Amino acid sequence: MMFVPFTGIDNHNRNVTLGAAILGSETAETYSWLLRAIKNAYGYAPPVIVTDQDPAMKRAIADVWPESRHRLCMWHIMDKLTTKISGKDCLQLFGLILYCPKLLRLNGPLLFMISG
């Protein structure tokens, strides 16, 4: 059994619970059923949905809510990044780029030359 919360952000920039479900499996079919139920309840799909990197959920979103922008949760990205990238300098550089308030144009190879 799996608990699936649906959380949104209100006009005061606070998290609000929009709904939740307990699912018996983590398949694309089960997620599709849930997303259709939510779409029927609210009358529309959300403009943006943020999830972890579950491939079954990704397929369900593309199938049921193709108009929604699917983005990955920053916590999950950063958690996996530490297992994929070694070196404190690289992680710090990635953090600086990630939270940079201005858009930067960098060539891929140049990015790592700057750090070292």
Image: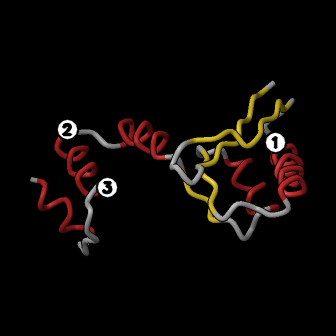
User: Label 1, label 2: how many angstroms apart (C-alpha)?
Assistant: 37 Å
Which sits earlier in the primary sequence, circle 2 or circle 3?
2
- Residue 24 at x, y = what percent? 86, 29
Mark 1: amino acid: Thr
Which sits earlier in the primary sequence, circle 1 or circle 2?
1
Q: Residue at x 27, y 48 (%)?
A: 95
Front residue of this view, candidates 54 and 98: 98
Which sits earlier in the primary sequence, circle 3 or circle 1?
1
- Badge 3 element: helix
State the residue position of label 3: 98
Q: Which mark is residue 43?
A: none
17 lies left or right of 88? right
Mark 2: amino acid: Lys
- Badge 2 element: helix
Q: Which mark is residue 27?
A: 1
Q: Residue at x 40, y 41 (%)?
A: 78
Mark 3 residue crowding within 10 angstroms, few (<14) / some (14–19) / many (20+): few
42 lies left or right of 18? right
Mark 1 residue crowding within 10 angstroms, few (<14) / some (14–19) / many (20+): some
Mark 3: amino acid: Leu
Q: Which mark is residue 88?
A: 2
Q: Residue at x 25, y 75 (%)?
A: 105
Residue 46, placed above or below residue 23: below
- Residue 85 at x, y = what percent? 32, 43
Say which of marks 2 and 3 sits in front. 3
- Residue 52 at x, y = what percent? 59, 43
Residue 73, placed above or below residue 65: above
